[in-house]
């Protein structure tokens, strides 16, 4: 939100999701060649329940890497496809730790073991939000926003979020070129004619 405020936008925060952890038992990562985390929530949950030291970690997005405490690989394109493109092969034994219902691309392509760490629950505000533009940072948020029926155009963080938003009836007017917070801010700046980089 700070970046949007720095771009001189009035920001209305409308929580649409809450995170529910799916357990507390330790997750032993010592036998894996790669551990993959694809979201900040997944990285935090894995770090909380971590047993052993992973050999190598790949994270989608720098924020996800930071939430885990660092990563050996952060692909230039912050998608599962981008991670697959840069992950050395053969990858060996792989653990994908993420949200319940996560896309199965990494599991299928790498024959990875999958452990669900959390689920997202949709929240419904008492009244639909008002605004000129909504910023959607995940497919889950896009689905939840679409169910509100608010006629507000959207900026999406990436292709999966765009697809989810459009399938939920949300008009996507711009997709971030880089699938991270900086990309979202650049897309907002381009659309609103205020492309100043926030400090």
Image (spheres, helix red, strand yellow):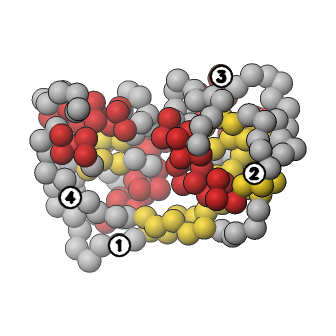
Q: Mark 1 or mark 3: which is in front?
A: 3
The answer to whether mark 3 and mark 4 are in CB contact below 8 A is no
Q: Which mark is residue 41?
A: none
Where is residue 123 drawn, in percent x and y?
A: 39, 71
Between 180 and 57, the residue placed more toward the observer is 57
In this rendering, is residue 52 above or below 178?
below
Quick check: 130 left or right of 161? left
Which quarter of the figure has residue 4?
top left
Mark positioned earlier in the residue sequence (4 or 1):
4
Mark positioned earlier in the residue sequence (3 or 4):
4
How far apart are labels 2 and 4 at the CA level?
36 Å
Residue position for label 4 = 12
Residue position for label 3 = 86
How far apart are labels 1 and 2 at the CA level?
30 Å
Mark positioned earlier in the residue sequence (1 or 3):
3
Residue position for label 2 = 114
How far apart are labels 1 and 3 at the CA level?
38 Å
Which quarter of the figure has residue 101?
bottom right
Residue 101 seen anywhere in this rendered image of the structure: no
In this rendering, is residue 190 above or below 119?
above
């Amino acid at each position: 939100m700070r970046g949007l405020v720095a771009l001189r936008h009035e920001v209305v925060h409308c929580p649409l999701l809450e995170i529910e952890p799916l357990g507390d038992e330790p997750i032993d990562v010592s036998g894996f060649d790669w551990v993959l985390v694809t979201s900040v929530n997944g990285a935090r949950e894995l770090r909380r329940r971590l047993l052993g030291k992973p050999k190598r970690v790949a994270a989608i997005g720098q924020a996800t890497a930071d939430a885990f405490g660092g990563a050996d690989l952060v692909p230039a394109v912050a998608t599962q496809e981008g991670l697959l493109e840069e992950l050395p092969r053969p990858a060996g034994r792989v653990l994908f730790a993420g949200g319940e219902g996560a896309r199965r691309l990494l599991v299928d392509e790498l024959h990875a073991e999958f452990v669900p760490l959390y689920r997202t629950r949709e929240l419904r505000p008492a009244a639909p939000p008002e605004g000129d533009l909504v910023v959607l940072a995940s497919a889950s948020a896009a689905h939840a926003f679409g169910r509100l029926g608010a006629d507000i155009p959207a900026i999406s963080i990436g292709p999966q979020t765009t697809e989810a938003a459009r399938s939920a009836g949300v008009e996507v007017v711009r997709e971030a070129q880089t699938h991270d917070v900086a990309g979202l801010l650049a897309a907002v700046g381009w659309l609103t004619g205020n492309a100043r980089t926030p400090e």
